[in-house]
Amino acid sequence: MMMNSANSPITGTGEPKPTPSSAPVSVPATETPVQQTSAEAELPLRLTIGLLGMLLASLLAILNEQVTAVALADIRGAFSIGRDDGTWLTALFEATNVATMVFAPWFGV
C-alpha cells in the first residue's frame, strides 16, 4: 500500500496519528431522564398571569375606544365644536393612544 501525505500515519509534527483500536471502551452509565409529561403540558404560573393580563389589557383598550366614540358627541358639544372640527379631536385622541403604546412596555417592567 502506498502512503502519501494525505493518509500517512505521521502528522506534520513527526508524531504518529492515533489509530482506532478495537478494544472495548467503557462508558459511564447515565441516569435515564425522568419523564415530566404532566409538568411540560402545564403553562408556568407567571406565563399564565402574563397572558391573562394581556387579554385584559386588550379588552379594556377596545372598551376605551367604544366609550370614547359614544362620548365624543357630548365632548364636542361641551367645547362647541362642529363635526368637521371634531375629527381633529378624534385624531388627537388616537395620536395620544399611539404615543402611549410606544412607552407602555417600559412602564410595565
Image: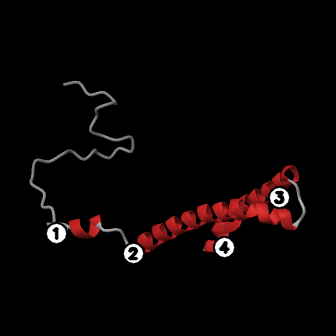
Which one is earlier in the sequence, the residue at label 4 or at label 1?
Answer: 1
Residue type, numbered disc 1: Glu
- What separation in Å lies between label 1 and label 2 (alpha carbons)? 29 Å
Residue shown at 26% from the left, 28% from the top: 3
Residue assigned mark 4 = 107
Residue shown at 26% from the left, 70% from the top: 39
- What separation in Å lies between label 3 and label 1 (alpha carbons)? 68 Å
Residue assigned mark 1 = 31
Residue assigned mark 2 = 45
- What separation in Å lies between label 4 and label 1 (alpha carbons)? 46 Å
As drawn, the label of residue 68 is none
Point out residue 74 in the picture as x, y percentages from the top left corner.
Answer: 78, 65
Frontmost residue, 30 versus 35: 35
Which one is earlier in the sequence, the residue at label 3 or at label 1?
Answer: 1
Point out residue 62 in the picture as x, y percentages from the top left corner.
Answer: 60, 61
Cβ atoms under marks 3 and 1 closer than 8 Å: no
Which one is earlier in the sequence, the residue at label 1 or at label 2?
Answer: 1
Residue type, numbered disc 3: Leu
As drawn, the label of residue 89 is 3
Cβ atoms under marks 4 and 1 closer than 8 Å: no
> Which element carries disc 3, helix, strand or loop?
helix
> Which element carries disc 4, helix, strand or loop?
helix
